[in-house]
Amino acid sequence: MKTLYFITGSQDLYGEETLAQAAADSKEMAAYLSEKLGGIAEVVFKPVVRNSSEALAVCTKASADKECIGVIMWMHTFSPAKMWITALKALNKPMLHLHTQYNERLPYDSIDMDFMNLNQSAHGDREFGFICTRLGIKREVVSGYYKHADVIEKIRRFAQAAAAVDFGRGMRVAMFGNNMRDVAVTDGDRVESEIKYGWNVNYYGIGDLCDIISGVTDEEINAKMSEYSEKYEMNTDNTAAVREQAKYEAALEKFLARENISAFTDTFQDLHGLEQLPGLAVQNIMAKGVGFGPEGDYKTAALAAVLCKMAEGRTGATGFLEDYTYDLPEGGETELASHMLEVSPVFAAEQPKIEVHPLGIGGKSDPARLVFEGITGEGIAVSMIDMGDRFRLVCAEITLVKQPEPMPKLPVARVMWKLKPDFATGSAAWIYAGGAHHAVVSTALTADDIRLFAKMTDTELVVIDEKTELGAFEQQLEMLDTIAKIRR
Ligand code: MN
């Protein structure tokens, strides 16, 4: 299991008794938190740090430990912070600075100087915080008694974000073909994506997939067909078209396993050797947590995989969606998000129907796809764009709503939502920020989770929410551009 190091700071000045007590307390706290994290990561107690060489040793170890996804640090006693400088410069894992103490209440009857010297995180954590700030270290500070529910929830979110960042390091992403010709926002610097996030993004010819497709057996297709009939309603007589998608999915699964791929893209402009654009096949795979981006959008595909990892164990849906069209009654503006075919069934409010319809674009046979209405609830839409000198995350809070009327002629799955704080502000802010028409939408994650991811990966983030005001938002964008220019 992945681990979070629990690192307690102290110093040499205290006697053996105080240090032994600090160690015993920390061990108990680490075990408590480990249990509360419920399998996201094991919180591992590390010997109390007394001096700069011990600090360097544990931080170097955490940085080199492949199982370690981050560190939780707190100062049980005072810990003079110059001893942390070299160590913190060597630390390359996400840090949670837990500002807490072993005791919940002051023992008013018995408190004396010994107690004060042992339990002085109010003092030691400020000294530690100073040196982190002075070194410019991005970290998450969580304050409060470590057994309180809100503190545990914050640690849990940190652990899930850290697990997702860790998952991204070394993640392999396949692009079948390149990105759609002439489209700007789906393009990006793949080398920089690997430097910054560890996403290893590579091109594959669609022929690589066709070779596997030609080897798929009838038994494998039949197995897929029974999976489909268990999960979905068959609303077509064109079984041959559905079997074609089943064949694609079986082949895609083999390819993903063989190449150790966690996210992939395709494009309707490069389907040589395929009879249909993969629809149902991709939809069913997306529901299993594999990242997907259409039209060669590797950033959305990779981000979807990473955010699915972050959302593991939570209720709600996560996956790619595209801004498509609007319903614009004054004051009641609603967006309809969908795609040509590829909407993940995790967003279905009802049992999805398998249907076969013509697809005007791409010049291929009628593809089978899942059609459904979308779920409702609070969510976020997240877009990653390449600004040339940096990546930017745009995160908008949205409210998914029930479609107000049936759409009997729309042959694709769809999800509808309202923007915050209102349509005019939310959509203009997204456009000012340069947000794409592709996003990863999640009802399992919140803007706070994306903030953590941005912090851990040092990615620029702008959030559009209930408090967004366009004047201030534009000023924020201008400031971010100015800072980037100065850094260049
Ligand atoms: Mn698209």
Image: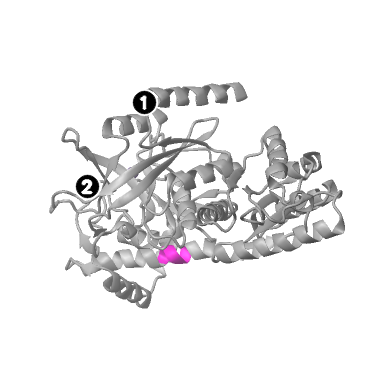
Q: Residue furthest front?
A: 109
Residue sitting at x 37%, y 42%: 397
Residue sitting at x 74%, y 59%: 46
Give the crowd class for mark 1: few <14, some 14-19, many >=20 residues within 10 Å. some
Of residues 242 and 269, the one nearer the viewer is 242
Q: Residue furthest bottom?
A: 219
Left or right of residue 27, residue 38 in this image: left
Residue sitting at x 60%, y 44%: 141
The correct choice, above or below, for 462 with respect to 310 in the image is: above
What colouring method underlies this structural image? one colour
Residue 85: percent from the left, percent from the top? 77, 40
- Location of the N terminus (image quadrant): bottom right
Going by the numbered disc 1, the residue's amino acid type is Leu
Residue 29: percent from the left, percent from the top? 65, 61
Going by the numbered disc 2, the residue's amino acid type is Gly
Of residues 44 and 366, the one nearer the viewer is 44
Q: Is residue 322 magenta?
A: no
Kindly tell me whether residue 222 is visible in this rendering. yes
Spatial CA distance of label 2 from label 1 is 38 Å
Q: Is residue 252 magenta?
A: yes
Of residues 156 and 113, the one nearer the viewer is 113
Earlier sequence position, callout 2 versus callout 1: 2
Residue pointed to by mark 2: 360
Ligand 1 rendered quadrant: top left
Residue pointed to by mark 1: 470
Residue sitting at x 41%, y 53%: 292
Q: Is mark 2 within 8 Å of ligand 1?
A: no
Q: State which region is magenta.
A: 251-255
